[in-house]
Amino acid sequence: MDLTNETFAPLRVMIDEFVRGGVEHAVVAPGSRNAPIAYAIGDHSGLKTWSVLDERQAGFFALGIAKSTGKPAIVTCTSGSAAANLHPAVIEASHAGVPLIVLTADRPPELRDVGAGQAIDQINLYGGAVRWFVEAGNHAVSDQTLRHFRALGSRAVAESSANNPGPVHINLPLREPLRPISTDLGEAAGSLGAVGRPDGARWTAEASAKPLAQDLFSAVAAAKHPIIVVGDQHQPELALTISHFATATGIPVFADSLSQMRRAQLAEHTPVIAAYDLILRSQPVTHNLVPDLIVRVGELPTSKPLRSWLCEVDCRQIVLDPRGGWQDPTRSASSVWVCDPLATFTAAAGRVESHTANPSWTSAWTGLERAAQSAIDHALSEEPFPFEPAVYRSLLGGLQGGASIFISSSMPIRDVEAYGPIGRDDVRYLSNRGTNGIDGVISTALGVRAPYNCDRVIVLTGDLAFLYDASALAIAQRHGIPLTVVCVDNDGGGIFSFLPVAEHQEHFEELIATPSGVDVEAVVKAYGFAYTAPRNADELAAAVEQPGFVHLKTDRAANKTAHDHVAAHVLDSVGAALTETGTFH
């Protein structure tokens, strides 16, 4: 390895350790102080390097890569406010449990607090949002220095991808030379710290005992009216294992749109309940179908009716939380099991010999699901195009090939949760639900797409979330990353029309709904993106099969009225279906 000089040598060995630990992608935001980091990254053959001009977008782009691959991604920037612009992505990675390695260049100690440019306090800049922070230091190059930086690299990978994955932050105060000018480093150049351990082994390999899987089978065997709630999780194999377990036991599965369980192949045999958000708005349902056990996996779904129900029911609730983060905002959990959900469900499935749930319990829920889905289809067909839930339902139900669907927070994620269909088996659903913000939607989606040449990504977003990150379209053009963006444009924050604040109209439009007045078509075309504005469902179905920007203008007031009408129709159908089940035991 060419260590170059005293500035570059520690960086090169640290980055080599990242690669030995499985890191494959690095995102570089340009700058002078981080030039040595950028060159060291660019020179390593084991890394695919992405250049992104804006630091905030670079952070979300790296987040998307890590979310998509499940491996830590590197993001680096120069000193000063550039490092502060990574903070939103760091916070999202922390709350969502996404592994990220943040390398911030910094001024050396002698240039801090003396008026030097681009010098801010970067020590613990991201506070409690990172799993680990270290100031790397300015050590004269020696074998011990290089060992130190290799150890930092090993630990950074381990800390970011441990049982509670998330971001780590290494602050790198760099002195001149910031250019790759070669100098003689003496004996350090051939030391063990310079070349690393033999055969590409990591400097320090972490081994941790996995918690023993709890006996899930014993819990469900004692219950007659159990429910499994599966929220945001990214493992298709976990979705398949839960499906096998639920099929064998007869337990209904409330499957969030981000659970990877709304798949035709799974729903064919498994009692998947996708319309739970609308079903649970029915008081007769919540009063008559009372569970005696709830098992929760993944992040808790967005649905307000579901969360209210979880608070109201008096039964044992088990949360399987591999991160040990006490993911229980409803304060309803009886037990939090810090264990691997995949291992837990696999072990439990091996013990199932026959259905454990009461058959009438299972059939009651599947009957309500059929009634709700039929009512949704009928009610949506009565609404004029483009009604927002109908857009998402027809789009997702009519895809001609596999895709990753990246869903913006705010209204899109709620509409997809409530109205999204059981769809193709080769579709996965992703979203930034760690902090539920609308930051970096386009940047993250591009990061999701970037590592794969054959996958396609379709973004479902509103106009405000798009405009907040519109300049990320430059990333797509610069790197040739194909992307399909479906933007439902209701000229403002449509979700606020559904909240109590909408009852107070004074200042509502100006300060809460906030119509932008921006010509979205002009913005899109300025970045060289193909633009279409479908006039009907058939044109929409054709448009989403190609990269480009799909623009659908809707009316906020009409959208709210139509939502209420559709929900009322579904509730009527659910109530009739519940009556047909007769007395429930």
Image (spheres, grey):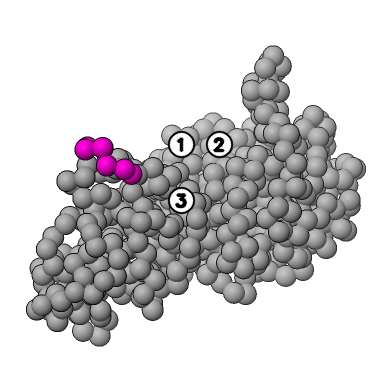
The residue that mark 2 highlights is 307
Q: Position of residue 456 (x, y in %)?
A: 65, 67
Q: Position of residue 426 (x, y in %)?
A: 65, 69
How packed is label 1: few (under 14 Cα within 10 Å), some, or many (20 or more)?
Answer: few
- Residue 164 in view of the camera: no
Q: Secondary structure at mark 2?
A: helix
The residue that mark 3 highlights is 55
The residue that mark 1 highlights is 329
**What range of the chain is rendered magenta?**
113-118
Magenta residues, dominant SS class: loop
**Which amino acid type is shown beneath numbered disc 3?**
Glu
Q: Nearer the viewer, mark 2 or mark 3?
A: 3
Q: Position of residue 516 (x, y in %)?
A: 69, 34
- Residue 88 in view of the camera: yes
Q: Nearer the viewer, mark 1 or mark 3?
A: 3
Q: Where 110 falls versus 355 (above or below)?
A: above
Q: Where 483 falls versus 117 (above or below)?
A: below
Residues at marks 2 and 1 touching, judged by CB atoms closer than 8 Å: yes
How packed is label 3: few (under 14 Cα within 10 Å), some, or many (20 or more)?
Answer: many
Label at residue 401: none
Residue drawn at x 53%, y 61% is 447
